[in-house]
Structure formats: structure tokens, C-alpha cells
Image: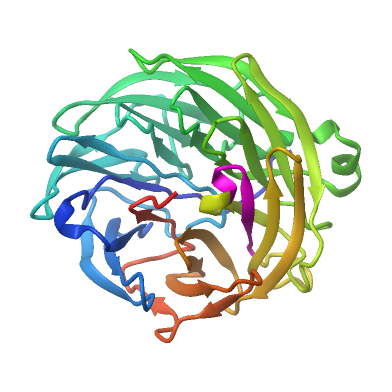
Amino acid sequence: MKMSFWVCITVAVAALLSNSFAGTAYVVTNNDNAGGNSATIYSLNTTTGALSPVVADLPTGGFGNGGGYFATVGTGAAVTGAIGCLFVNDTGSSDIASFKVNLPTLSITPVGNFSNAALIAAGGSLVVTPNGKFVYATYSNSENIGAWTVNSDCSLTFQGVYQASVGPDLYDGIKVTPNGKDLLVTAPDFGAVEQFSIDPTTGALNDLGFANFASLSECISNGCYTAGIDITADSRVAIIGNYTLTAPSVLAAEITPTGLTHATYFSVANTGSLTANDNVPFLSAAAYRGSGPLYLGFSGIGSGSQPGVVTATFSETGKSITGKASTPISSPVDYQGLIAATGKLMVVSEWFNTLQVFTINSNGTLTATAQGPVSNANANGAYSFFIYPNTR
């Protein structure tokens, strides 16, 4: 039986990459608007945490679903010299909108909308390989994965359609390893994560099989529904969120050249009222390199549960994840979407069209910055976002 979720939207951007913008961070959103989708680019003051719109409403030429989603994280960059490419996933119209970005001047030119009849969205996620050569997206209606090649003019060429060996599913979470060699895709209805190797020349995917979390004793008791993914800098460990309503937890697996191994369930303590749907894991810069704070975004869906962020300590060598602190976050409807950190700041997407920036304290708790919630009239859902530059 398929689980019922809101559609997931992801944006990948390689805009603003210029020395003239050094020291400034940017937040780019996918607004998931069913009446005509758009993206918004904010500048992020890395001292005060204030968000200011730079491009308030960039039409994609396609349509969103008007619902957003609470989980998947998709980030990436496509950069060639002074030209960057911005890609926005239009899941209402089942296309990927592409833009050419002149990086020094921040002028943005629409390139086109790219689709294939075998790929039908109504929900999906998107990611770009670290070298900017390939784009992968998931399509929840056709329950498959599309592969695209990025051309020098930021247009996309269709490469192929894939389905995970674990079976057809929504394939919510999607992430490319930092070394660009592998693609991981979550299959929440199966409680699994699939690994594909990436052909470095063509971008074709080779299915290496899946890690089956559903068979773990803890998952049999508490339920495991794989959600967002983050991966360590050495491309060896994947951290996976868990949609379960019954026990705060996070999942992990080791990435090898032949497939995923050592599927592991970690119970997370010190979550306070944050007890349901740990959707989004995000490794701090230190944890990304092997040891440090791991942030877990809880959506707040579930009886008596609040949305918010749990900070855990992560050790790659010690193979441990331990809860440290929690921060409840009250959004307009008490639902929370994506989280991402840059330096000592964390950005949180709150239902249904709000971003809020927090300072990360030394004890792992969060404090809202003076600006407070920033709403976007052009957005419609627990919308996804991407922070540039990647400070990890």
C-alpha cells in the first residue's frame, strides 16, 4: 500500500558564483506554485541572518503542485567558466526549467523546459552532480528516475529512465555522493535506499541494489520510511531521515563500490516534544568531515508532536549518533520542511510559504534571529530551498 505524502519539490542552483559576491550567502527557493511556478533568490546576511529578496519572482514557464513537501534535500551546481545553470523542478507540468546565469552580473536568461513522456511527476526531487555534467530527477506518478545531460548552454539532453530494483515507488530522497560516483535514492514505502553508480562519461546509471532497513528489528517494531539523505565528505556514509510516527530515530548505511552495507537504526534521545517524522538530516561542516553536530529536521506531523530541529553528535569512525538538544519551532500551521546550515546559521522552511533563520548555539539549540519569519506570497507549500555557497 502506498503512503500518502505531499509532493516534494527541489531546486538546484549554481548561480552567484563570483568573486564579487564573496562573503555573501544566497537562499534560492522553488515556490511550487500551481498557477505558474517560480523561484526566488534571497541574499542572506551571514552576520545578522537577515534575508532580503534579490530576485523576488523568477517564472519557470511551468507549473508546480501547490503543496510542497517536508523532506527531500536536493542540491548541486552546474558551472562552466563564467556561466552558471539554474534548474527548477516543475512537478505540476512534469518538466525541469533551466536558466543560464551570467555570474558576474547576475543576469538570468530562460533556456527552456525539458520533459519526457515516460517521466510524469505530481511530485519529485532533483539533484545535479558535483561536476555539473548531469541532472537526475524523480517522478512520483510514473514512479521512476530520469537522467539528463547538462549542455554548455544549460539546456538538458535526455539520457534515460530508471527504476530501482527494490520496486516502483515515490523515490522521495535523492542525493549524489560528493565524489560524483554514485546516486542514492530513497524508497519510503519499502523502507529502503537504492544505490546506483554513475557512468562518468554518459551519466548512465548502474543499479547496485538496495539497503533494506525495513528488515531491521527496530524498524519492524517502530516503522522505517526512508526520507531525506545527507552524505559525508568521503562519500562513505549516508545518513537518512525516518518518517516514522512512533519513535524518534535516524538511519545510516555505508556506501561501497558494490552497494550499500551495514544498514543501521539509531534511536535519538533528547528530542523533547519533537517525536515524529525526522525527515531531513543535515551534517554540519565538522560532521560532514567525520565528527560533529548532525541536525535533524522534524516535520511535526503526528499526534502531540511539534516541528523543530534536533541536534545530535555524529562520529563516522565511532559509528555513533547521539541526541544532544532540541529546539521546537512554531510555524503558522506547525509544520516544518527543509533545514540547511551555513556557518553558525540555520535556515528552516515552515508551512506553508515561510523561511526563518536561526543562530546555532554552542549547546546545539537554536535561537531565532531578529528578523523572524519571512513569508513569500509567490510560494505555495513547504517549499524547498538551496543555500549558496556550500560552506562545507
Q: How many marks?
A: 0
Left or right of 313? Residue 376 is: left
Residue occupying image coordinates x 28% and y 66%: 42
- Quadrant in the picture for residue 269: bottom right
The percent coordinates of residue 379 (x first, y second) are 36, 66
Residue 288: say if magenta: yes
**Taking the image as drawn, is residue 80 in sight?**
yes
In the depicted view, which residue is nearer to us: 157 or 238?
238
Instruction: Say which quadrant the N terminus sits in.
Output: top right
Residue for point 65% across, 74% down? 327
**Residue 332 showing in the rendered view:** no
Q: Which residue sits at x=42%, y=27%?
A: 146
The image quadrant that residue 317 belongs to is top right
Viewer-closest of 8 and 103: 103
Rendered image coloring scheme: rainbow
Q: Is residue 335 magenta?
A: no
Identified at 50% across, 36% down, the residue is 175
Q: Position of residue 301 (x, y in %)?
A: 68, 65
Instruction: Please identify the dominant SS of the magenta region.
Output: strand
In the image, residue 113 sits, relative to residue 381, either above or below, namely: above
The image shows residue 262 at horizontal and vertical percentages of 77, 28
User: Which of these two is toward me, 110 or 2?
Assistant: 110
The magenta stretch spans which residues?
287-299
Residue with the most extreme bottom position: 370
Seen in the picture, residue 306 relative to 62 is either above or below; the reply is below
| 392 relative to 232, above or below | below
Residue 57: x, y in percent? 22, 64
